[in-house]
């Protein structure tokens, strides 16, 4: 009875080995103990139920009935010829060699050790060896638990998870695509807001020139006393308005500040574009990384489902394991579909911001940050406020308002209208010369309304500077929260969460191999490790985006409507009309 129970246990473990072998995950396994001199080979397809059952029955007979006879061994050693109707896509066949086993205490431990080796290959937690080649198209960075597909020379072993910790080196298959700098250059050349602000800057320059031009002289003819024959008078005159109190110079100064403000607005818009491009670039890069990551996890989930189904067929597993494996596979398939959709959407938005909305999606080349230094936010706020082109533009508006006050205050000083005329008087038969000088007297209109408005504009512009400073600090406060939380997340994931998640998966494997837990717990650990890796990529993307906002003076809005503050030439009209 005891012998039968022991034989049943041996048969159960042997089935598990055959299931692993049927997946094509072993190149060979041997049991320790007392070996007979004869070896025999079993040919096991990757997924073949009939062959699997035949191999299981053969091994059961070995374990229950002892070593086979010579005739039985000869019959068992025959390998069936492949069918001519076999599909070219049939899974490759792996040859697994088993030695004859005689009951021995060491055989049990060796069977368990062999099963552990095969299962660890299935769960793919080992680092690739020197003869393994990287076949993923992702860039190999990293202090992240980024997955990649590794295949040995036979193509039978799949490794899906890199070693944690910083990994540096050159690998084949590195993505070569558009970099952040290339897309920024494309955006600065094609984004319509840049062209708009260039145009408004040219307008401001034109107005500056116009308001500083002097008045044109007037040349005319005057005749008098045509009804009284012989006394008619004829004169030719020229008149000129003399602008006093340096009004034209002050006009130019006001409009020059408007031009400077437009130049700062143009610079600010470049930062807005660069910031938005950077944000969407890292969004798309993270989506691209998630696609690659999920694709590599997908191969592991497919193997896991296949393994769960084979376990159930061999009466080693349950339907619950199959269902859990299917759920994990479906979740990964859905995550892949969503990641691809997000990548395409992020690319379309990136192309639209760059001003080339019809550009086809292309691979992106870049790195997500794995570490960053904490920032002194008080110092950063001071630096950004002083250096931000948005703040400098607001300060320039204050300077413009002050210049306009000076200009409006001299407006009551009258200009001089000069006229010189020369002619001939037929009545006296003599020539004549006339000179006329005139000036408006500021009795009623002393430009008091414009002066009051200019002073109010100065107050408004000053408060606008305060508003922009507070706005910058408020936006920076939001960004600082994103940056610090992302930095903490990236650091925590790299140092603790990812290693712990990996360790949890390894412990689940070990417990399963020791028979202390079910395969469902291995699937749960796989799901946890999968989600942890995706969360880490999301934290990296958020950290990169926060840093981009800081570098871009927290300016965003690459496609917001451009406000035209180029000014006008109204000061010229005011200068020439003092009524």
Image (cartoon, helix red, strand yellow):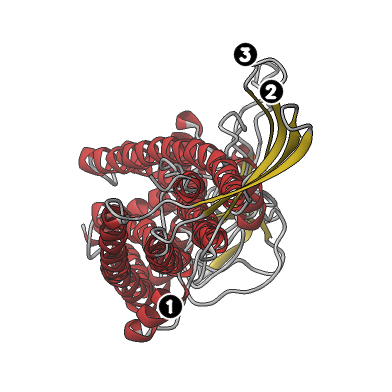
What whole-number distance in Å separates the C-alpha atoms at marks 1 and 2?
Answer: 73 Å
Mark 1: few/some/many CA within 10 Å (<14, 14-19, 20+):
few
| Residue lying at 42% horizontally and 45% vertically, measured from the top left | 563
Q: Earlier in the sequence, mark 3 or mark 2?
A: 3
| Residue lying at 39% horizontally and 51% vertically, measured from the top left | 16
> Residue 4: horizontal and vertical position, in percent?
27, 55
Q: Report if residue 340 is visible in the image.
A: yes
Camera-near label (1 vs 2) is: 2
Q: Is residue 388 above or below residue 183?
A: below
Name the residue at the front extreme: 428
> Residue 252: horizontal and vertical position, in percent?
56, 59
178 or 173, which lies in front?
Answer: 178
The residue beneath circle 2 is 232
Label annotation for residue 386: 1
What whole-number distance in Å separates the C-alpha atoms at marks 1 and 3?
Answer: 76 Å
User: Is residue 91 rendered to the left or right of residue 312?
Assistant: right
The residue beneath circle 3 is 227
531 or 17, which lies in front?
Answer: 531
Q: Is residue 355 above or below residue 64?
A: above
> Residue 111: horizontal and vertical position, in percent?
42, 64
| Secondary structure type for disc 1 | helix
């Amino acid at each position: 009875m005891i012998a039968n129970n022991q034989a049943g246990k041996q048969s159960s473990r042997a089935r598990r080995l055959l299931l692993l072998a049927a997946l094509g995950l072993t190149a060979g396994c041997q049991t320790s103990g007392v070996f007979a001199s004869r070896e025999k080979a079993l040919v096991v397809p990757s997924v073949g139920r009939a062959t699997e059952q035949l191999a299981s029955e053969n091994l059961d007979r070995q374990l229950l009935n002892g070593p086979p006879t010579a005739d039985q061994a000869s019959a068992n050693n025959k390998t069936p010829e492949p069918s001519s109707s076999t599909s070219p896509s049939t899974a490759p066949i792996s040859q697994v060699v088993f030695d004859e086993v005689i009951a021995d205490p060491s055989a049990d431990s060796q069977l368990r050790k062999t099963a552990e080796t095969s299962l660890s290959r299935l769960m793919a937690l080992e680092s690739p060896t020197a003869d393994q080649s990287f076949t993923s198209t992702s860039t190999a960075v990293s202090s992240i638990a980024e997955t990649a597909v590794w295949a040995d020379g036979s193509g039978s072993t799949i490794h899906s998870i890199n070693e944690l910790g910083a990994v540096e080196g050159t690998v084949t298959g590195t993505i070569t695509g558009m970099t952040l700098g290339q897309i920024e250059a494309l955006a600065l050349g094609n984004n319509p807001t840049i062209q708009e602000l260039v145009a408004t800057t040219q307008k401001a320059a034109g107005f500056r020139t116009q308001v500083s031009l002097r008045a044109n002289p007037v040349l005319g003819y005057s005749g008098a006393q045509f009804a009284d024959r012989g006394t008619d008078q004829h004169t030719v005159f020229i008149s000129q308005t003399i602008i006093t109190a340096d009004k034209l110079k002050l006009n130019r100064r006001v409009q020059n500040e408007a031009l400077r403000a437009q130049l700062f607005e143009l610079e600010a818009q470049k930062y807005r574009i660069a910031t938005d491009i950077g944000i969407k670039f890292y969004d798309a890069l993270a989506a691209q990384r998630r696609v690659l990551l999920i694709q590599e996890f997908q191969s592991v989930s497919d193997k896991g489902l296949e393994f769960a189904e084979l376990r159930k067929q061999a009466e080693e597993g349950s339907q619950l394991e199959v269902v859990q494996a299917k759920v994990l596979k479906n979740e990964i398939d859905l995550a892949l579909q969503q990641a691809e959709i997000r990548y395409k959407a992020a690319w379309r938005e990136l192309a639209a911001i760059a001003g080339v909305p019809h550009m086809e999606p292309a691979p992106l080349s870049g790195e997500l940050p794995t570490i960053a230094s904490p920032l002194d936010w008080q110092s950063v706020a001071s630096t950004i406020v002083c250096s931000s082109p948005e703040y400098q533009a607001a300060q320039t508006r204050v300077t413009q308002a002050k210049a306009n006050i000076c200009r409006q205050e001299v407006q009551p000083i009258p200009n001089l209208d000069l006229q010189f005329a020369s002619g001939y008087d037929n009545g006296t038969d003599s020539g004549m010369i006339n000179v006329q000088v005139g000036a408006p007297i500021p009795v009623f209109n002393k430009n008091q309304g414009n002066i009051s408005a200019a002073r109010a504009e100065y107050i408004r512009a000053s408060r606008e500077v305060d508003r922009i400073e507070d706005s910058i600090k408020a936006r920076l406060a939001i960004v600082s929260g994103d940056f610090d939380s992302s930095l903490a997340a990236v650091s925590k994931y790299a140092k603790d969460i990812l290693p712990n998640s990996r360790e949890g998966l390894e412990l689940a494997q070990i417990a399963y191999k020791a028979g202390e837990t079910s395969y469902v717990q291995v699937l749960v650990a796989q799901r946890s490790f999968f989600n942890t890796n995706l969360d880490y990529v999301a934290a990296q993307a958020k950290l990169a985006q926060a840093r981009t906002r800081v570098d871009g003076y927290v300016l965003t809005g690459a496609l917001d409507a451009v406000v035209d503050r180029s000014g006008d030439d109204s000061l010229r009209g005011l200068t020439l009309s003092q009524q």
